[in-house]
Amino acid sequence: MITLRYHIVSISAVFLALAVGIVLGSTALSRTLFGGLAAAKDDLGRQVTDLEAQRNGLAARLTDADGFATGIGPLAVAGQLAQRTIVLITTADADPVDRDAVKTLVTAAGATVTGELQLTDGFADPRRADELKDIVTRLLPAGVQLPTVSDPGTLAGGLLGPVLLIRKADNQRQASPAESAAALSGLAEGGFVRAAGEIRPAQLAIVLTGGAVSGADAGDRAATVARFAAQVDRSGAGAVLAGAAGSADGTGPIGLVRADTAAAQVLSTVDNADTPAGRIVTLLALREQLDERSGGYGIAGNAEGPVPGSPTG
């Protein structure tokens, strides 16, 4: 006869067997699982080591390339802009190191920097656009006609272009010294520009900017710089807009120029002026401007090629 005690003992034996099985099974599974995880960890460790070695190797090669470009730069641009005059315009986010390096190459190319002008943060601030436009219209030199468009970048270029550059046709000033001084003084007092000493009008211009523009009004700021540079280009023998990595993005000033067919037909752009190679290209692109040719150069996906005359990539 099967008693209650027999049922209890039977059920207990079943649960005990299950418990023993689970313990034994989990122990074996744990060994297999942890063994697999350890192997995967070792494999990932080897991959990380390999990637770090590759990164270090690429960094070393990049350092070597930059060193070579720095050394060869003066030879690469020698005589390219002999007896030419250049005005250097920088935005608020341009790196002073890039500015000084470009100035050194300008001298090596045989040209002279006739002045430096920095555009402040306020220059591209859309909240101050009406104030900038008001100053531009009030200080316009006699005989200078502003573009018919109304955006602040183009209008500011319509004023500063003739003030900073001589006419391409006859190499004569487009504004009198008094008019130029008044325009620069008015913009400086308004907090839109800073002049580094005396500025004499030049034949060519380099507009040096930073990298990617960020913030809620990034598009408006970048557009002001892009349109300003394009209008400055139209005022003299040529100009180049050169920027650092990120400047050729869709919302960057160089990216906006390259997306604008009309602007890209006159204004040359360089998107890697934060490298020694890019600074060389900036001077070569400026030389190309004298031949009434333009292009977009650098390493960004929307560049025509790395240097003027190179195959498109």
Image (tube, rainbow, N blue to C red):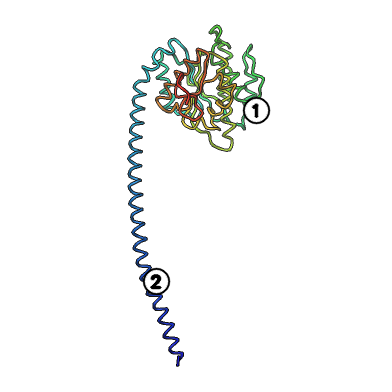
- Quadrant in which residue 107 is drawn: top left
Q: Secondary structure at mark 1?
A: helix
Q: Give yes or no for contact between labels 1 and 2 (Cβ–Cβ under 8 Å).
A: no
Q: Residues within 10 Å of mark 1 (few under 14, many from 20)?
A: few
Residue 61 visible in the snapshot: yes
Front position in the image: 5 or 111: 5
Q: Return the mark for residue 274.
A: none
Residue that sits furthest to the bottom in the current view: 1
* Up/down of 265 relative to 82, above or below: below
Residue that sits furthest to the front in the current view: 1
Q: Residue at x 60, y 18 (%)?
A: 159
Find the distance from the CA under tag 1 to the CA under tag 2.
Answer: 78 Å
Disc 2 residue type?
Answer: Ile
Residue 114 visible in the snapshot: no
Q: Residue at x 38, y 68 (%)?
A: 26
Tell me how many marks there are: 2
Left or right of 214, for residue 38: left
Disc 1 residue type?
Answer: Asp
Q: Return the mark for residue 22.
A: 2
Residue 72: image location, x then y, percent: 35, 20
- Quadrant in which residue 137 is drawn: top right
Q: Secondary structure at mark 2?
A: helix
Q: Residue at x 55, y 12 (%)?
A: 177
Query: Residue under circle 1?
Result: 130
Residue 207: image location, x then y, percent: 50, 22
Front position in the image: 177 or 279: 279
Residue 169: image location, x then y, percent: 56, 8
Mark found first going from the N terminus, 1 or 2? 2
* Up/down of 132 relative to 18, above or below: above
Front position in the image: 102 or 43: 43
Q: Residues within 10 Å of mark 2 (few under 14, many from 20)?
A: few
